[in-house]
Image (tube, rainbow, N blue to C red):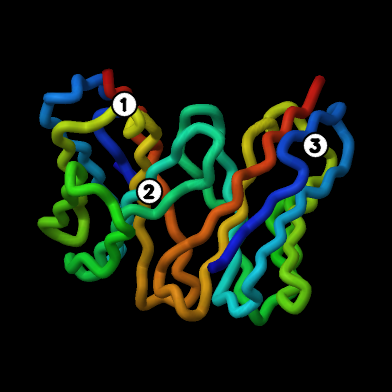
Amino acid sequence: ETGVTQTPRHLVMGMTNKKSLKCEQHLGHNAMYWYKQSAKKPLELMFVYSLEERVENNSVPSRFSPECPNSSHLFLHLHTLQPEDSALYLCASSQESQRGYEQYFGPGTRLTVT
Amino acid sequence: KQEVTQIPAALSVPEGENLVLNCSFTDSAIYNLQWFRQDPGKGLTSLLLIQSSQREQTSGRLNASLDKSSGRSTLYIAASQPGDSATYLCAVRLLTSGSRLTFGEGTQLTVNP
């Protein structure tokens, strides 16, 4: 595996379900991100983890709960979601000590909340 | 608050044409600017990264320029091909925003054979 991988690629869940999205980076980076991409809207940054510590949380509802157990893995735990949470969820990583901070993205998880 | 605007929202061209995509941003205190490509339903692929001290970057048929003082960047695609069809996104990182990227809404490009 190379780059940034995400599982599952597609997820359909009811509003009362609990599910988790997983992201893994194979680039040796030390920062990871969750973004939300909704139709006709720019990408929105949700969470940032740097050195496994959450450094940014952009007013995201508590029904989204991130977890970063180590620098290679990032999870997004979902519970009691709303239909408007249907979107493409993208994970990214970067090496924060490296000038440039270029972010590399995974393929995304397409989430549909019914 | 940094705002990023991309014009046009959609563009359709015949194969072989040279084209320019535009990105403008309101806060010129940026660290860098990144151009991405996104295929339908897929993640983002980084194309070019321009540091604030640079004027342009080139990769193959792609050339990105940056004019920080006027808050503009352009992505030039030479000799376009049907495989270039995708949505192109620009994103800026401010000096004061840590690792946060602010994205534009993208330009949807279609190159017709």
Alpha carbon of mark 1 to alpha carbon of mark 2: how far? 17 Å
Expressed as whole percent of the image width and height from the top left, the position of residue B24 reads 71, 61
Q: Secondary structure at mark 3?
A: loop
- Closer mark to the observer between disc 2 and disc 3: 2
Alpha carbon of mark 2 to alpha carbon of mark 3: how far? 30 Å
Q: Secondary structure at mark 2?
A: strand
For the C terminus of chain B, the image quarter is: top right
Disc 3: which residue: B80
Which amino acid, mark 1? Pro
The dot on residue A49 is none
Between A110 and A31, the residue placed more toward the observer is A110
Q: Picture quarter containing residue A114?
A: top left
Residue at left offset 12%, top offset 25%: A17
Expressed as whole percent of the image width and height from the top left, the position of residue A2 reads 34, 45
Co-location on one chain, circles 2 and 3: no
- Closer mark to the observer between disc 3 and disc 1: 1
Chain to which mark 1 belongs: A
The dot on residue A83 is 1
Between B5 and A96, the residue placed more toward the observer is B5
In the figure, B71 relative to A87: above or below? Answer: below
